[in-house]
Image (spheres, rainbow, N blue to C red):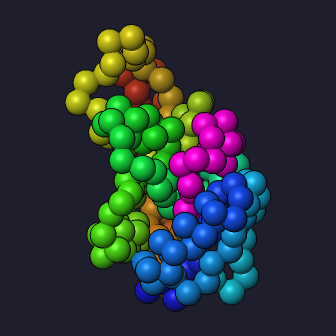
Amino acid sequence: MREQCVAHLIGRGDEQIRMLKRIARRAGFIELQPLGGGNTSGHTKDRKLNYFLVHHELGAAAIEAVLRSIRSSIIADVRYAPIVLFATDGPFEQYLGYVQMGFDDVVTLPEKADIVEQRLIAQLDTKYVYFDTATCFGPDRRRMEVEPPPEHKRATTPHSHVRHHFRRDPDRGIVVMRSDSYLAFGHRPMRVVRIG
């Protein structure tokens, strides 16, 4: 399955790229593309599915820039591609912070090679939903929250957003199945479905 994918390695310096390369090779990726300081065009003509593997020591500002660049791409095979962060083990709040940044998955190291492989394969051939709001595009950033942090207040008024339902198909690339628009109207969002 990974022979139909390309792993884009995003790190700063040779050491970070080497680490991501080892992880990607052990996970079964054949084609690797080091992107260095944040070039995230990620467009390849001969491969249908992109993965972006990010080193946690890239730095918060660079990581946010990478996420923004990928998620704002006009190329669907880039915009909906899985972005996986590889970080060292730390407090759960740190892990949660990475999830809230918009990563599809955060793998803490050290981790067994077969577990990493399973986590990466889990990004394929499954139905996904991305949220498109005025401030972000990507997976549900609240998916790991038990409850909102005390200093974080959610909006009590409805807001407009779009939910994009899609699949990452190793043979066909990104397949967007439908997009549901939720328009703020009165006291609850109204759903408008757009197919394709």
Boundaries of the magenta span: 52-66
- Residue 31 lies, in percent from the top left, at 61, 83
Q: Is residue 164 magenta?
A: no
Give the camera-side residue of 185 and 166. Answer: 166
Q: Quadrant of the N terminus?
A: bottom left
Residue 180 can be seen, yes or no:
no
Indicate whether 171 appears above or below 85: below
Residue drawn at (40%, 35%) of the image: 94
- Residue 10 lies, in percent from the top left, at 64, 59
The residue sitting at the front extreme is 15
- Residue 79 lies, in percent from the top left, at 62, 57
Magenta span main SS: helix
Indicate whether 154 appears above or below 193: above
Q: Is residue 163 left or right of residue 146?
A: right
Residue 44 can be seen, yes or no:
yes
Q: Is residue 87 left or right of residue 117?
A: right
Residue drawn at (65%, 57%) of the image: 11
- Residue 103 lies, in percent from the top left, at 48, 49
Residue drawn at (34%, 74%) of the image: 113
Q: Is residue 186 left or right of residue 58?
A: left
Q: Is residue 164 left or right of residue 47?
A: left
Quadrant of the rendered structure where residue 163 is? top left
Q: Disc count in the image?
A: 0
Indicate whether 194 appears above or below 174: above
Give the camera-side residue of 41 and 15. Answer: 15
Residue drawn at (44%, 80%) of the image: 26
Quadrant of the rendered structure where residue 148 is? top left
